[in-house]
Image (cartoon, grey):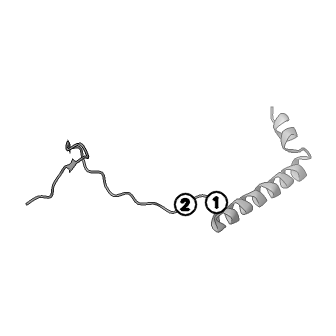
Amino acid sequence: MSARQYVIDDRGLANTFAIEPKMYVQESQTGFKPYAELLNGRLAMIGFVSLLALEVFTGHGLIGFFANLS
């Protein structure tokens, strides 16, 4: 025999809507994660060194480089 598919509320009425699944709480994904911090730091170092190389090879900073492209 199948399980009861409805719930009787406090007024004696049947709630025949779908039964909601049990909820679970996921661990928080916010905050500082070691791998993300390492990746961000490495990408920042690569960007900084790239800007220094651009200035050495062109003689202009980043804004001057883009201003002289046309």
Q: Residue at x 81, y 55 (%)?
A: 48
In the rendered image, the quadrant that contains the N terminus is bottom left
Q: Secondary structure at mark 2?
A: loop
| Residue identifier under label 1 | 31
Q: Estimate the x, y position of residue 13 in percent, counting from the top left.
A: 20, 42
| Amino acid carrying mark 2 in the image | Ser
- Given residues 52 and 5, the one toward you in this image is 5
Q: Is residue 33 left or right of residue 44?
A: left
Q: Estimate the x, y position of residue 57 in percent, counting from the top left.
A: 87, 51
- Badge 1: residue crowd in 10 Å (few <14, some 14–19, many ≥20): few
- Given residues 65 and 6, the one toward you in this image is 6
Mark identifier at residue 28: 2
Against 47, is 11 above or below? above
Q: Residue at x 24, y 46 (%)?
A: 9
- Given residues 42 and 33, the one toward you in this image is 33
Q: Secondary structure at mark 1?
A: loop
Question: Which residue is outermost to the bottom?
Answer: 34
Q: Is residue 27 left or right of residue 7?
A: right
| Amino acid carrying mark 1 in the image | Gly
Residue 15 visible within the image? no
Residue 45 lies in quadrant: bottom right
Answer yes or no: do the residues labelled 1 and 2 have beta carbons within 8 Å? yes
Q: Estimate the x, y position of residue 2 in percent, counting from the top left.
A: 11, 58
Residue 14 lies in quadrant: top left
Against 20, is 42 above or below? below
In the rendered image, the quadrant that contains the C terminus is top right
